[in-house]
């Protein structure tokens, strides 16, 4: 026979390459987010406000198959303004602006269904961003609260991914996200709970047991947020919300769990003391 022989392809090469890409981009994102969180209120607010603009673009792309339409600009401006107003101490005004943005985005949409999804997107993506700034604005416990949320969400996502890949087993929600398993869910619950115990011991002035339970609850909220985003993408027949992050897709694909965790954390803070939300989340008798 003549001609060149084809190189033998390693079937594990593609998954390994994807994993390396995913890990690398996640480390870069985590480093940037951590540095800006630690640097102060202004850098953190700028980061979150910029994130809301990206999320608005991805939402328009996912739900309306549009990008720079009127709905996007209304969504982006209202959500970013709400973040800035929250940082300036005008929290109630920020909530009003976000609500007005939801109404404006709905009015700008071309159909009834698009109006519903546009309004929902402003609230679903804008409210967690506003709440992140609110948690960070706690002068004493704000930074620790944000890092606690990051710790829970990132460890839940990582543990669920590797546990599910290693152990496999019954599917968690096959119609929504075929790749997720109950073993992954368990891993994504156990690891953040254990890390929450360590965080409580490092913090020193809180109940280790209650903060561990809090971490477990937020880990569940994080995984529910992941499933919610998967359901939205499946409804609109979209694989990824964007292509911003190599190995992950869009920013929405990366922060879906954080959205769920922040909403869960806000419920906890709301029942205790919303004005000092960082302390309400972390400090337990």
Image: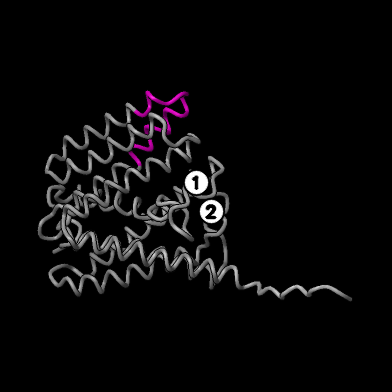
Specify the segment rendered in magenta: 105-124
Which residue shows up at 16% across the image and 51% down it?
A: 272
Label pair 1/2, CB-CB below 8 angstroms: yes
Q: Nearer the viewer, residue 21 or 129?
A: 21
Quarter of the figure with residue 261: bottom left
Colouring of the image: one colour
On the rendered structure, is 72 left or right of 8?
left
Image coords of residue 277 (percent x, y): 17, 52
Residue 216 is covered by the magenta coloring: no
On the question of residue 214 being in view, the answer is: no
Density class for disc 2 (Cα within 10 Å; few <14, some 14-19, many ≥20) is some
Q: Which mark is residue 149?
A: none
Residue 117, magenta (yes or no) = yes
Image coordinates of residue 219 in percent, x first then y, are 35, 60
- Mark 1 nearby-residue class (10 Å; few <14, some 14–19, many ≥20): some
Q: Is residue 166 visible?
A: yes
Image quarter (top left, top right, bottom left or bottom right) of the C terminus: bottom left
Magenta residues: mostly which secondary structure? helix
* Residue underneath mark 2: 177
Q: Position of residue 55 (x, y in %)?
A: 37, 45
Q: Residue at x 53, y 66 (%)?
A: 18
Q: Residue at x 16, y 58 (%)?
A: 40
Residue located at (27% from left, 32% from top): 99
Determine the residue located farthest toward the right in the rendered image.
1
Q: Establish if 184 lies above or below 81.
A: below
Give the distance between the C-alpha atoms of the residues marked 1 and 2, in whole angstroms.
7 Å
For label 1, the residue is 231
Q: Secondary structure at mark 2?
A: strand
């Amino acid at each position: 026979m003549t001609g060149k022989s084809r190189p033998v392809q390693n079937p594990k090469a593609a998954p390994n390459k994807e994993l390396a890409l995913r890990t690398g981009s996640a480390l870069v994102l985590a480093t940037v987010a951590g540095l800006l969180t630690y640097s102060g209120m202004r850098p953190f607010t700028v980061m979150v406000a910029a994130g809301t603009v990206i999320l608005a673009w991805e939402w328009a792309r996912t739900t309306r198959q549009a990008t720079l339409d009127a709905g996007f600009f209304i969504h982006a401006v209202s959500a970013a303004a709400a973040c800035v107003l929250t940082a300036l101490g005008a929290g109630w005004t920020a909530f009003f602006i976000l609500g007005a943005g939801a109404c404006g985005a709905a009015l700008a949409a071309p159909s009834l269904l698009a109006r519903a999804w546009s309004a929902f997107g402003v609230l679903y993506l804008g409210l967690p961003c506003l709440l992140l700034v609110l948690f960070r604005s706690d002068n004493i416990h704000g930074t620790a609260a944000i890092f606690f949320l990051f710790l829970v969400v990132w460890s839940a996502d990582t543990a669920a991914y590797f546990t599910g890949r290693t152990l496999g087993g019954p599917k968690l929600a096959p119609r929504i996200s075929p790749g997720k398993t109950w073993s992954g869910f368990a891993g994504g619950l156990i690891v953040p709970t254990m890390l929450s115990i360590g965080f409580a011991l490092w913090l020193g002035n809180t109940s280790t047991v209650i903060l561990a339970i809090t971490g477990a609850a937020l880990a569940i909220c994080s995984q529910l947020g992941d499933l919610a985003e998967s359901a939205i993408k499946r409804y609109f027949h979209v694989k990824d919300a964007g292509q911003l992050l190599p190995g992950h897709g869009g920013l929405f694909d990366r922060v879906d769990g954080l959205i769920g965790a922040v909403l869960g954390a806000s419920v906890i803070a709301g029942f205790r003391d919303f004005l000092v939300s960082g302390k309400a989340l972390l400090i337990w008798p």
